[in-house]
């Protein structure tokens, strides 16, 4: 028995050493961390951060916590090679190397085994190049000026409904403004992209009574449970675990909701009973997807692809916007001088107190600069993943000047990760990167490629302008009437509020703490 145990331990040790050696070769022996798990692996997310030398796990929050701690001491690149679980991965924090990876190149592509495809089905955000081209070509016409005009008008309507239902915020501070921005963003994307209209008090109604969770609640559960969903085998959901059953319920409910809406819209198209009150008609995003599901040509979509895109756009289309808006309001509550500049800009554009029109959008330049700067400091999508499709040569840049130092060969199959936080806090692009300074975007010399809040290159987020339009409209509508200030808890200092609220936590998106604010009506 002892010999068998020794043999098993020996085999395990040898296999782990072989994995480590193979990983080091894949990243061309780039310097970095050698650990048990990688920060972007499933177990790396689930298992708590550990500094134990044997079971070192950097944890999912690693890149946020290390942004000022010399993670990239000499070059704009490091490698993380695990010996226990997860792929060998390189992380880059420079625009120069980012362009080599997610620019117009065939050497790198989305992951072969994409978590996004596994979770949601084939969709425009997760497919590799050829599949993405088809999906993008189908969807591009739907993202038109007519859509953005509708986004602006719907944002105003939904904001007024929110203010009325929330009692004009007279009674108490807002405990977490993300609860408002998340519901607002979900209502906007549901109405404008999918023509799913619902009221503020009923955030996507349940199919039946009896304690079923709303779609919004299911989104929350799914967002916080993605690592579990990726790790747990299907048979595990039949176990007597409340946590697993809750996760399974949320994902299944979201999938069934998407399928039911696709089936309903298909029936409406066939019967000619579709409501075109939104003015977009067949060019609406959802109608474009469903129509592609009925086609037979090379640009046809399967039902799984239609559902996958519906699910993904509802999910990503509101979560990232909500987080960015919360960060913007947190920053403006701390920086009253910048908030005053926004207010003065609003009164200058709307001197007669009229409702803002979409034609005013380009006039709110400082408002947009504040939104961009907050998103730079707290990018909801904090990493961009690619896989080497072939052995690829990557030119390394140094940390001080951004000049090429040498080439390395990244082996086929190696993961590459654009560290968005690392780029956004790189002082080479943004002097004093930790400071909220919206005016930096007025400087014509700023490297706009260094802002990666919506991605970069040909696969930049298809909904970037959608998100910006609804966000600026929300900020204009709120700040024209309300002054936002930090809400301190009992005996809490401003510095303690900063620590509680502004400490990022990387789950699937980068989240702040509960953004507690006080809203005061302007006289």
Image: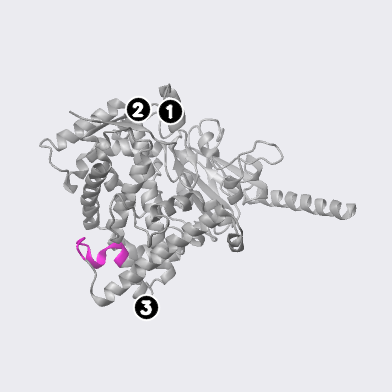
Which x, y percent locates residue 380? 42, 44
In three-dimensional space, the C-alpha distance between marks 2 and 1, rounded to whole angstroms, equals 9 Å
Label 1, on which residue?
498
Quarter of the image for residue 240 reads bottom right
In three-dimensional space, the C-alpha distance between marks 3 and 2, rounded to whole angstroms, equals 55 Å
3 or 2: tag closer to the N-terminus: 3
Label 3, on which residue?
296
> Within 10 Å of the Cα at label 1, are there few (<14), some (14-19), or many (20+) other Cα atoms?
some
Q: Nearer the viewer, residue 99 or 223?
A: 223
Q: Are marks 3 and 2 in contact (CB under 8 Å)?
A: no
Quarter of the figure that contains the C terminus: top left
**Which mark identifies residue 334?**
2
Tell me where the magenta segment starts and ends, as one range: 276-287
2 or 1: tag closer to the N-terminus: 2
Q: Are marks 2 and 1 in contact (CB under 8 Å)?
A: yes
Q: Disc 3 or disc 1, which is closer to the eye?
A: 1
């Amino acid at each position: 028995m002892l010999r068998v145990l020794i043999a098993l331990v020996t085999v395990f040790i040898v296999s782990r050493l072989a994995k480590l050696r193979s990983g080091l070769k894949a990243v061309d022996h780039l310097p970095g961390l050698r650990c048990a798990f990688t920060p972007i692996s499933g177990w790396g997310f689930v298992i708590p951060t550990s500094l134990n030398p044997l079971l070192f796990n950097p944890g999912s929050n690693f890149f946020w916590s290390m942004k000022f701690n010399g993670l990239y001491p000499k070059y704009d690149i490091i490698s993380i090679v695990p010996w226990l679980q997860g792929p060998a991965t390189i992380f880059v924090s420079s625009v120069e190397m980012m362009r080599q990876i997610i620019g117009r190149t065939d050497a790198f592509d989305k992951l072969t085994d994409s978590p996004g495809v596994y979770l949601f089905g084939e969709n425009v955000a997760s497919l590799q190049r050829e599949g993405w081209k088809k999906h993008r070509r189908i969807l591009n016409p739907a993202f038109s000026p007519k859509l953005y005009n509708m986004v602006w008008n719907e944002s105003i309507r939904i904001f007024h409904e929110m203010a009325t239902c929330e009692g004009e915020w007279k009674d108490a501070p807002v405990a977490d403004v993300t609860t408002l921005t998340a519901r607002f963003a979900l209502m906007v994307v549901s109405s404008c992209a999918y023509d799913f209209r619902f009221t503020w008090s009923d955030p996507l109604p349940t199919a039946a009574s009896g304690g079923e969770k709303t779609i919004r609640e299911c989104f929350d559960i799914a967002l916080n449970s993605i690592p579990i969903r990726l790790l747990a085998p299907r048979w595990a959901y039949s176990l007597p675990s409340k946590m697993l059953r809750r996760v399974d319920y949320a994902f299944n409910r979201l999938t069934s909701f998407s399928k039911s809406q696709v089936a309903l819209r298909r029936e409406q198209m066939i019967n000619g009973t579709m409501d075109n009150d939104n003015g977009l008609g067949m060019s609406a995003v959802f109608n474009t997807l469903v129509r592609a599901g009925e086609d037979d040509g090379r640009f046809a979509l399967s039902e799984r692809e239609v559902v996958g895109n519906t699910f993904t756009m509802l999910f990503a289309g509101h979560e990232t916007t909500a987080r960015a808006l919360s960060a913007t309001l947190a920053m403006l509550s701390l920086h009253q001088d910048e908030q005053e500049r926004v207010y003065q800009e609003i009164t200058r554009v709307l001197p007669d107190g009229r409702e803002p029109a979409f034609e005013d959008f380009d006039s709110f330049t400082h408002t947009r600069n504040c939104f961009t700067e907050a998103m730079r400091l707290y990018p909801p999508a904090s990493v961009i993943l690619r896989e080497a499709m072939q052995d690829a040569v990557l030119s390394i840049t140094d940390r001080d000047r951004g000049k090429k130092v040498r080439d390395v060969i990244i082996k086929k199959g190696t993961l590459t990760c654009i560290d968005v936080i690392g780029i956004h806090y790189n002082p080479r692009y943004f002097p004093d990167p930790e400071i909220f300074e919206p005016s930096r975007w007025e400087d014509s010399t700023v490297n706009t490629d260094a802002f990666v809040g919506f991605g970069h290159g040909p696969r930049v987020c298809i909904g970037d302008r959608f998100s910006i339009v609804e966000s600026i409209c929300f900020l204009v509508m709120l700040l024209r009437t309300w002054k936002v200030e930090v809400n301190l808890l009992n005996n809490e200092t401003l510095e303690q509020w900063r620590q509680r609220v502004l400490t990022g936590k990387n789950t699937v998106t980068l989240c702040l703490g509960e953004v507690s604010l006080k809203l005061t009506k302007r006289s």
